[in-house]
Amino acid sequence: MKGRILFASLALIAAGIAGYLLYQDTLVPVSLAPGRALFVPARPEFGEDEAVIEALMPAGEILDAFLAAQSDLTLLEKGPEGGWTGQLLAGLQGSRHGRRWRLSVHPDWRMQDGSPLDAGRIATAIVPELARLEGGSRVMDPATLELRFKARQEGLPALLSRWRVPGSGPFLRQGNALSRFKGFIHGRTGLAGLRVATDPALMESRAWAQGLASARWAWAVFPGHMAPEDMAKVRLAPYDEFRMKDGSVWFLSRRLRRLRPDTDDWTRTRLFGVWKGAMDLPYDPLGM
């Protein structure tokens, strides 16, 4: 009799443990806002849609990150009012123990090489990031990817907002130049392209001031040291100043009508949809 009671007790304990483990492994949806709001199509005036603009910025890793953000999108994006927005992902689920995550790929997303985005493409792109976390992935079907980790990854959505898939964005990148990807799922970018000059000679006081006085640059990063007479010329040029939290200052042309840099992290600034109609321009309503 005692043996049966002990066996029953052990069976109940085992069932309880199994139930608890199953409960912890259950997937719970993460609320994601639709990603379309991240890409508001431009309303360019005649001819502006073919504009190739130029910017002047120092070379380095920060510039590379900015250019990559235009050509290689992240899986998620931080929402404007907090929370998360789906970008390359249409859905996200996480287990209660935080070691299993299921990613649902955005349907019908066209890559720059003409192929559709699928779970396998994402799995290949995030291999280095998963390796650093001692995680692995399994493609369940073309639209579903499952990630597993040895340790709890409660902050995975924040990581997914930094993990990029090459060739998924609205611009194609070649070195320090961007050109419009005409097949982007959310429409036309509003600009045909961007060229970034990084020549240190152009950042010298006289050359930098002349570039702004002639309205050559869509925006130019302040070089840090300016002769007073050169700065006086710059003050008359049609540019506004934007101060970034990293200490840099952008002089942004008033003709670049919608673009407003992300001052917290300007590498995440979007070029998509920066042209609007002249009536929407607060500084230069006639587009002069």
Image (spheres, rainbow, N blue to C red):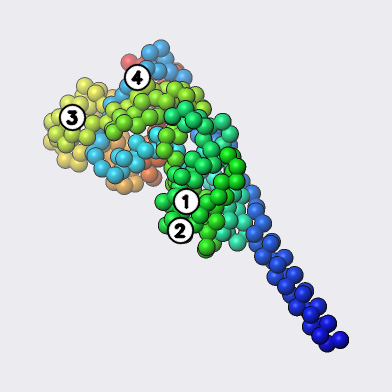
Task: Say whether disc 2 or disc 1 marks the residue closer to the N-terminus.
Answer: 2
Rendered image: mark on residue 209? 3
Identity of the residue furthest to the bottom in this view: 2
Rendered image: mark on residue 133? 2
Q: Position of residue 46 (x, y in %)?
A: 41, 12
Above or below: residue 233 compared with residue 144: above
Q: Amino acid at mark 2?
A: Leu
Circles 4 and 1: CB distance less than 8 Å?
A: no
Left or right, residue 143 beside residue 192: right
Q: Residues within 10 Å of mark 4 (few under 14, many from 20)?
A: some
Q: Amino acid at mark 4?
A: Ala
Task: Say whether disc 4 or disc 2 marks the residue closer to the N-terminus.
Answer: 4
Circles 2 and 1: CB distance less than 8 Å?
A: yes
Q: Amino acid at mark 3?
A: Ala
Rendered image: mark on residue 223? none
Q: Residues within 10 Å of mark 2 (few under 14, many from 20)?
A: few
